[in-house]
Image (cartoon, rainbow, N blue to C red):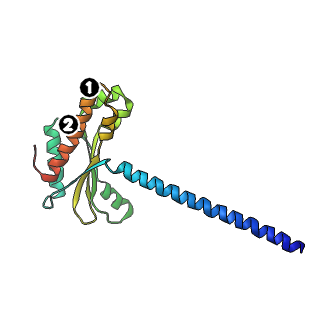
């Protein structure tokens, strides 16, 4: 009888622990799902994505973007062939992915002198990526939320932010169509 009482208490405590563990796991799962939904809704408008004309080669897209940036007086400050680097490191083939960066030196310095947080605006990063279907896309970060947060900033800061967004979109449009504005 003594052993059956101990066994019963032991089983009851294990069931309680099991129930708490299961409940904790469910709470964690629900929290993770809620976070994922929040991330999706937060990122819904956080990128600008433009389809590249099918007949354009990667090289033509790159050349058109470089020419547009030069015409606009921007400096090309970086290019990183990410998929190529991945293939070299892993010996695994990867869909095309390359990043290009452009800088307006004066605007960049003006933003940083106003707020270090705004250093994320320049250089503008544009990504040429190959989709699952083989179609090329140009993407960049949409800075509209940053623009919205700085409505009370001095007018010259607001102008720089709007200009940075327009610059990214113009370079991407030129790359996606191979037509310079």
Q: Secondary structure at mark 2?
A: loop
Relative placement, left or right, of 32 versus 134 is right
Count of numbered badges drawn on the protein:
2
Q: Label for residue 143?
A: none
Q: Is residue 105 visible?
A: no
Q: Label for residue 155?
A: 1
Residue 91 x, y percent position in the rendering: 36, 65
- When the figure is inspected, residue 87 is found, relative to residue 76, above or below; the finding is below
Labels 2 and 1: the sequence-earlier one: 2
- When the figure is inspected, residue 4 is found, relative to residue 156, above or below; the finding is below
Residue at coordinates 17% horizontally, 55% vertically from top-left? 59
Q: Secondary structure at mark 1?
A: helix
Q: Nearer the viewer, residue 10 or 47?
A: 10
For label 2, the residue is 74
Q: Nearer the viewer, residue 83 or 174?
A: 174
Q: Is residue 22 visible?
A: yes
Residue 52 x, y percent position in the rendering: 18, 56
Between circles 2 and 1, the one closer to the viewer is: 1
Residue 150 x, y percent position in the rendering: 33, 31
Q: Quadrant of the C terminus?
A: top left
Residue at coordinates 35% horizontally, 58% vertically from top-left? 86
Residue at coordinates 38% horizontally, 53% vertically from top-left? 40
Residue 69 x, y percent position in the rendering: 17, 41
Q: Residue furthest right?
A: 2
Quarter of the image holding residue 13?
bottom right
Q: Residues within 10 Å of mark 2 (few under 14, many from 20)?
A: some
Quarter of the image holding residue 88?
bottom left
Q: Residues within 10 Å of mark 1 (few under 14, many from 20)?
A: few
Residue at coordinates 76% horizontally, 70% vertically from top-left? 11
Distance from disc 2 to disc 1, alpha carbons, whole Å, reads: 22 Å
- When the figure is inspected, residue 138 is found, relative to residue 92, above or below; the finding is above
Q: Quadrant of the N terminus?
A: bottom right
């Amino acid at each position: 009888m003594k052993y059956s009482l101990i066994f019963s208490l032991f089983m009851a405590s294990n069931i309680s622990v099991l129930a708490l563990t299961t409940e904790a796991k469910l709470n964690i799962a629900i929290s993770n799902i809620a976070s994922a939904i929040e991330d999706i809704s937060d990122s819904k408008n956080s990128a600008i994505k433009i389809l590249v004309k099918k007949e354009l080669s990667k090289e033509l897209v790159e050349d058109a973007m470089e020419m547009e940036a030069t015409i606009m007086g921007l400096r090309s400050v970086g290019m990183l062939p990410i998929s190529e680097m991945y293939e070299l490191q892993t010996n695994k083939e990867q869909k095309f992915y390359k990043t290009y960066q452009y800088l307006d030196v004066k605007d960049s310095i003006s933003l940083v002198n106003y707020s270090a947080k705004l250093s994320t605006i320049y250089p503008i990063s544009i990504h040429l990526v190959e989709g699952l279907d083989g179609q090329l896309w140009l993407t960049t970060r949409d800075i509209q939320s940053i623009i919205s947060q700085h409505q009370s900033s001095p007018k010259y800061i607001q102008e720089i932010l709007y200009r940075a967004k327009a610059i990214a979109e113009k370079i991407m449009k030129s790359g996606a169509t191979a037509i310079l504005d």
